Amino acid sequence: MFYDLKGKTALVTGASGGLGLEFAHMLARQGVTVALAARRLSALDEACDRIRADGGRAVVVELDVTDADSVTAAVAAVPDRLDILVNNAGISVPGNATDLSLDDWNRQIATNLTGVFLTAQAAARRMIADGNGGAIVNVASILGLRVAGAVSAYAAAKAGVVQLTASTALEWARHGIRVNALCPGYIETDINREFFASEAGMALIKRIPQRRLGTPRELEGALLLLCSDAGSYMTGATIAVDGGHLVSSL
Ligand code: NAD
């Protein structure tokens, strides 16, 4: 089948919670063996148990994307062969540019841009060695394409991910590796639910043309498209799933 991912193996970074955990479940439901990667092993163990309880296949891999040795070890620990990387781990430390500390700037660039690069690089090396090509999905953001207040480091890192996606797609196409970026708009998860229930959060939602937040499930179509042969002629692309937020009226 065109969308068939059965028997593939995926590494999902930042899989201990939020969207990464959702992406892991989506892939596991398609018969993909999922290597769940993040720093908190206890949260990963729980996620792994839940996927197995649903009949899926999962393993846990310890990973800090800001540490090159950790990235190399995590990619090497993926069982069988590596077919898919969902490069999802990310952090956000909001703050006006004038007040942003160098430490907060560095942390966001280290996780959201350098971490994405290191993980994609290690995955591509493994995919080339395995000889079967592969699919890399870098999770960027609509903030990599447009801006909002108090997110300068985050937006700069995500814009970097969009260009990194295009440049690595160009370099790795010859190895059968496709690299694409998924740019979610505002998606409701545990960590932002409270904010979006506030007055400021509701004002933000009014600026989204579809007048609501997205659900994690609404990213599934784009994820599976980019991971599977349904997207076999797509590389270097950036797909936004954002309720029209990028085309909101200026
Ligand atoms: P989240 O905070 O719920 O999850 C982030 C995950 O990344 C966690 O598992 C965390 O442990 C992991 N992580 C953080 N630093 C890490 C590191 N150094 N090494 C390994 N893992 C690390 O956030 P989320 O909302 O699920 O976001 C997931 C991705 O989606 C991020 O890249 C984020 O920028 C992007 N995104 C989210 C939204 C949204 O509305 N939720 C919108 C656009 C983009």
Image: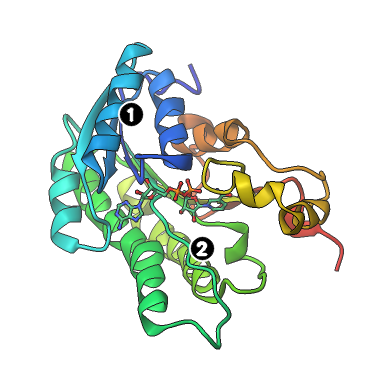
Q: Which residue is at 42% across, 83% downward?
A: 101
Which element is circle 1 on? helix
| In this view, 224 is above or below 70 | above
- Snapshot quadrant of residue 201: bottom right
Residue 247 seen by the camera: yes
In the rendered image, residue 113, in percent from the top left (x then y), is placed at: 39, 66
Amino acid beneath label 1 = Ala
Q: Is mark 2 within 8 Å of ligand 1?
A: no
Residue position for label 2: 162
Which element is circle 2 on? helix
Identity of the residue furthest to the right in this view: 249
Q: Dot 1, crowdedness within 10 Å: few (<14), some or many (≥20)?
A: many
Identity of the residue furthest to the bottom in this view: 98
Q: Is mark 1 within 8 Å of ligand 1?
A: no
Q: Which residue is at 63% across, 36% downward?
A: 215
Q: Dot 2, crowdedness within 10 Å: few (<14), some or many (≥20)?
A: many
Q: Nearer the viewer, mark 2 or mark 1?
A: 1
Look at the numbered discs 2 and 1 and tell me whether their residues touch, using CB distance below 8 Å: no
Left or right side of 136 for 218: right
Residue 185 seen by the camera: no
Give 160 or 112, whichever is nearer the viewer: 112
Q: Which residue is at 29% across, 28% downward?
A: 46
Residue position for label 1: 47
Q: Which residue is at 30% across, 49% downward?
A: 175
In the rendered image, residue 143, in percent from the top left (x then y), is placed at: 60, 64
Left or right side of 133 for 160: right
| In this view, 116 is above or below 45 | below
What separation in Å lies between label 2 and label 1 (alpha carbons)? 29 Å
Looking at the rendered structure, which numbered label has been put on residue 101? Answer: none
Left or right side of 98 for 65: left
Give 40 or 174, whichever is nearer the viewer: 40
